[in-house]
Image (cartoon, coloured by chain):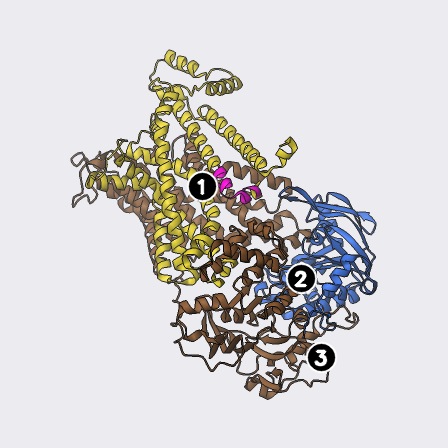
Amino acid sequence: MSLPHLLRNPWTAFLGRRTARLLLSLGVVLTASFAMIRLVPGDPVRAALGVDAAPALVAARRHQLGLDAPFLSQYRDYLSGLAHGDLGTSLVTGTPVAELVRTRLPATLEIAGLAFLVTLAVALPCGLLAAVRTRDGRHPRSELAFTALTAGLAGVPDFVLAAGLTAFLAVGLQLFPVAGSAGVESFVLPVLALSLAPTAVLVRIVRVEALKVLSEDYLRTARSKRLSPARRYLLHAAPNMATAALTVAGSLLPALIAGTVLVEKVFAWPGIGSALAQSVVTQDYPVVQAMVLILGTTVLLAGLLVDVLLALLDPRSAIRES
Amino acid sequence: MSLPIRYPRSPMAWAAAAMLASLVVLALAGPLLWGAAADRPDPTAVLQGPSAAHPFGTDSLGRDVLDRVLTATRPSLLLALAAVLLGATGGILLGASTAVVGRRTRRLLAGLINLLLAFPALLVAMFLAVVFGAGAGGAMLALAVSSVPGFARLAQTLAAAVAGTDHLASARVLGLRRHRLLWRHVLPNIAEPLLLSTTTAAGTALVALAGLSFLGLGVQPPGYDWGQLLNQGLDRIYAEPLPALAPGLAVLYAAVAFQLLGEVLAGGVARRSPAPRTPAAPASTSGPAAAGLVLQVEDLTVELPTPDGVIRPVRGVSLSLRPGEIVGLVGESGSGKSLTALAVADLLPDRARISRRTHRLLGADLAAMTPKERERHLATGLAMIFQNPASALNPSLRIATQLTETVRTHRGASRAQALAEASDALRRVALPPAVLRARPHQLSGGQRQRVMIAAGLMVRPRLIIADEPTTALDVTVQRQITRLLSEIRRDTSAAVLFISHDVALVGEFCDRVLVMYAGTIVESLPADRLPTGTRHPYTRALVASVPDLTADRDRPLPTVEGALPEPLAPAPGCPFEPRCPRRRDHCAEEAPPLEDLDAVHRVACWYPVAAEVFAS
Amino acid sequence: MTALRLTDLTVRHHGPRGPVAAVDGVSLEIPPGTTLGLVGESGSGKSSLARAIVGLTPVHGGRVLLDGREVRARTVGDRRRLGRLVQIVLQDPDTALDPRMTVRQTLVEAATVFHRLDRPARAERVGDLLELVGLNPRFADRLPRQLSGGQRQRVAVARALAVEPGLLIADEITSALDVSVQASVLNTIRDLQQRLGLSMLFIGHNLPAVCYVSDAVAVMRHGRIVETAPTEALLRDPRHPYTRTLLASVPSLRTSLPGERPS
């Protein structure tokens, strides 16, 4: 394919635009994480080392962090450090943050990914079923129950649920481990805590989308052909609501990843989130900075992944977007 | 502005109101009643479990946990509300302004909102809380800022819908200034949904604030809110779950209260009176079959429940079609012509109630059949063609699937056989077989309507019901479609029921015309009598009001003054009586029946217009 | 009374595969006090043309001249100068009026854009405007949802006339209305032409309706004007094959086409 041809290809245009957006967002994350340690009120080094730390030690740490260099050269050093995989050093433990990320990132990705899959697996079929049952004003009682239940569940804060699950299922009934990551059963509670509210949100949206599709003219056409309900709902309705439903699901993913911070703290899950929570308490800013950077980047990459998957699933809407 | 609380008496509305009221009372009274006790340490009762004196136990200084949770209602609520109000104001102004600024600024703002939305609000709030410094004020500000993009996006979407309306375009052309467009035309029209989402956002903010405090970024000791209490108690969860969980339960309670409130305001849980659903009319068998009719319907009535009461958009319609006949059903919007078509095809929405004396397709009584037999008989006996071919075809399925599925379902045709038949059907409507592999969006409007007709032809129907099949098409394409239907009628001698609002088109293309007004057929006549031989005053006025290429431009067009009768309160007399220039007393008292004038002409009028007088 | 002249007007839209010329080098002229009808099928670019004249859509090439002076709509000031000369009425009766404003508020807002009016003058102006479009003055305090489609379109016409423009553009204003309602709106338009001496651009896809109110008719296809002629001449002697196709496609009760109705 020639270059002008390639440029006019909708796929190239889509990927080009999407990559540009990603780079711009990454720039924001980088700058924000860099600026953070310079913006925090007071002296971060003294805050971490304690008020009675020896001035010489404080000065040494400041130098080590590069906080005594001119601003722009600090930024340059920060970026070149990142390029070499240097995420800084913990003020508290003195260990490289990159090491911390390497050991902890997989655990976070595991529960976030699992929770997202659970959300999809539950919400998509349940939403469609609810729509079929309550379409056209049928079963008003079911609709009331559905709306009230999902509204309530959507309001359940993940970290409160996490604490509740720990108290009842782990401590009380001793069905699951109380904390940490060891074996399959340790995943159950964190994933449950993370996925409940997003599932409730998504199942509502899927139902609304499905009702919209069910009232489309082409479903009336399908009815006029006297096709079986299974064929009407699964072949004629489901594919047409998939894009809208998955777009919304994709937009829930960032919040779900951010939610790991609180949930990991409750379960002492050895991930990025609990490291961030702990470093906030100890005011270990280099760690906070790196964790914010890593979480922010993860969110952006997850968003990119979702968009590309959606574009593969429904090329027309992706092209329309770009 | 009135809130859209349509059914304020539903149990959920009561629950939400009660929960919210209890929160308000606690926020007001909590610190006064329990504030002192909540701060009183008791070294003798440290870290106790639940007891009569301390229902939720005590904390590490011996302070009563319940007192502390109740007292913390005020800071928790106040901080959340402040954050939401700040964030909503900023976000809504930012988002709504996109509707009134210039193109470039709008793109820039939209890009900015998109960029900010890529980051989850909670993460942004955590980041900002760190930057602003741990504390109640910092956390509140952080939360407010982090909620701006979400509000901005919502306001932007809603405002874009307003910006696309004709009235905003007109306001721009009038030369109104931007601030006036924003305050007068955009914001009032998006206020309601924004208010609703602000309510829900208050719950979210409350949770997020608790989360920040839980992380140690929010309220700092000695102050406390729910999140901070939860944080302090977390370590005890393995030993004493209840004292540890108590603040969490408070957060949960408040969060659910706001969620339910949002839900109630949205009217989403409106308690509907269950739609009056009579069981399918007992299968009383139809009246005697008239010989040689494709379709025979007598005394068809359709009732539809609406929020204001039951209406009867179709009232006592009778129609019959012979093989190879094209019958036009013409009427203006609200005349009930499309519902009549749907009722004939048994495709009315579930909530509609239908009654008829006779309903025979190809002589077989539909009322006497089991549902399964009826479906099969209708599927193979008649085909429907709908108004908008762009939406009547499924966008995600190939044409091949949409053409073949009927015969495969109802005739058990093999795939190869069905595809061969589909190619034939496409040839019949002058489309190449390659169309089979296409999806609807690759076809033009006229091609799509041909595909719809081909899909109908697949079952070799004896009756084709075409509901405004050309209304969405251009006039040159319209001509091709009517010509195609004429040819199909000629070749297959199928009957065609052609529904349209265009009396000129119907008059030109049909054999016989039924004129509908307010749910009844007012005149039935051969199409060639439409120009000069109409007898009902409505038909005559309808025909006269159509501008013609030869119309005299110096004379005003004849019009029908007045409006359709109120569907909820039909008067006893002739439905056209209030607008009729020839009305007399009798017309308001009794509705005229549809009676024969001669062998081919029937009219429902007490005082029909004389045939030879042409009113113009 | 305002004369409109377009020279080589071009408007482009973003299509899925790059820009598409919706209006492709159109030149036309409306002498003062006359009505030009513009007919075309969907997607022919007639609405884009109308919106470009009033500045709702950016112009990519060519000129818009009102009374011989070039106009543009870059700034709010430009737009206000333009608005005094040209007003537009759009297609959709459902969104034609702000749903939260009464007829009176809508008309007063329009009437006071360029003139200050005191209270009695406002009431009088609203009454005059309603009378002009054939509406009963008691409609003044109704909300749009209490009006029928035809009544809303009349109020929209009254709002456009409130600034006393020299040129009125009517973009498919009767397309969404029933025929009997369409007839009375067309009568109102004829009436306004005679009483106010307005110049008018009347856009539609219904050829008989456009011809009924127009002194001359331009036929548009794929963004270009294929034929312009005085209405009688166009009907009697269409030159362009597309015009002939259009004329032949119009269903008519008075002339039945042979072969269409087998007996």
Horizontal relation, residue A50 to residue B537: left or right = left
Q: Quadrant of residue B58?
A: top left
Q: Amino acid at mark 2?
A: Gln
Of residues B139 and B392, the one nearer the viewer is B392
Crowding at mark 1 (Cα within 10 Å: few <14, some 14-19, many 20+): many
Numbered disc total: 3
Residue C154: image x %, image y %? Answer: 67, 65
Indicate the chain on which mark 2 is placed.
B
Task: Identify the hue of chain A.
Answer: yellow
Q: Is residue A93 visible?
A: yes
The span picked out in magenta is A307-319
Q: Colour of chain C?
A: blue
Number of the front mark, 3 or 1: 3
Residue that carries the numbered disc 3 in the rendered image: B532
Q: Main secondary structure of the magenta part?
A: helix
C-alpha distance separating marks 1 and 2: 45 Å
